[in-house]
Amino acid sequence: MKLQSLMIILVLLVTPHLYAEDCVGQCTPEFQIEGIEISSLGNYGTLSDQVELINDTRDIFNKNSPEFMETFGKLTIITKQNTKSHCTANLVMLEPSDEVSWPEENSFITTSEHCLSSDGDIDYARSYITFTKRNGSKYRRNFSFASGNEEADWAILKLDSPISETLIKPLVVGDVHEEIMMRSGDWNVDTTVTAGGYSSDIFKGNNGKNLTYDQQCESKGSYGPNMMKTNCIAYPGASGGALVLTGADLEGYTVNYLVGVNQRLENGNPEKLIVTPSSHIYKALRVEYDAAGLLTN
């Protein structure tokens, strides 16, 4: 505890111009690179991206990572005023049913709504998401806004061109997980999930260059309307990243469910992640599927 406190003091001494003393809202460093103002939108909190945890249980994405980690994309948001920020988003599909067939390609991604809130209008023609495969290959897509909810802090975006299911297998958004792991907005105590994102910490996250993930996430109960609190580890920049229930069975197929979306940190603490349950997203994604003519009935 003394070591962590000393580190915070040192950070304050060496970075006095990066942070406002009375930081409100999204408190992250801002500076100029090639004429574009860069800021790491994401989890709210002061100095959290420069606080090293004694027990950081995150892994760094690599060739041996779980395949579902390929659904995590780095969301780069550019405004018409030339400000630039990043969050995290995931490739998803609606749970197959009598109305929904197993897709050959997918066009929808999920993230946090606050990632799309900025001081300027978002330039969707220049904003993009980048997916990275375990073999290092990258795939980039532009996107447009589909739907979202500011209070519950979730958003659905549509890619300008779909991604083949054989290239990246999406996370499943559906109702099955509700019975498996949620009780009155809470997870079963015996269930652990994986949380990931492009955290901008200067340690494992490498200023948002690395995709990191924590496979030891557990629920710590409800946190008011539309939210749950967890012990998942994340830093600014991971906002919008999915919480994933892995290895679930669906009609004989092994699938990975999106069960929550990274919303923010509690009081800027990287060990206390606040999450939006995916039940808020399921109905909205059905509406988008219907509008796109993807429902059979």
Image (cartoon, rainbow, N blue to C red):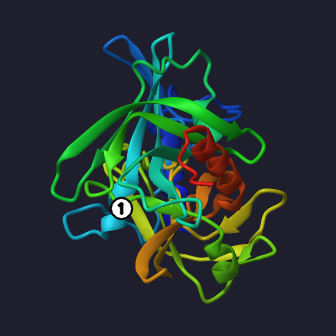
Q: Residue 257's spot in the image, x, y percent?
A: 52, 68
Q: Nearer the viewer, residue 73 or 84?
A: 73
Q: Quadrant of the C terminus?
A: bottom right
Q: Nearer the viewer, residue 131 or 84?
A: 131
User: Which image quadrant for residue 221?
Assistant: bottom right
130 to the left or right of 259: left
Q: Nearer the viewer, residue 207 or 78?
A: 78
132 to the left or right of 86: left
Q: Residue 114's spot in the image, x, y percent?
A: 64, 37
Q: Residue 26's spot in the image, x, y percent?
A: 63, 35
64 to the left or right of 121: left
**Disc 1 on helix, strand or loop?**
helix
Q: Quadrant of the N terminus?
A: bottom right
Residue 210 seen anywhere in this rendered image of the structure: yes
Which residue does the numbered mark 1 point to in the structure image?
Answer: 69
Whether residue 210 is situated above or below residue 258 in the rendered picture: above
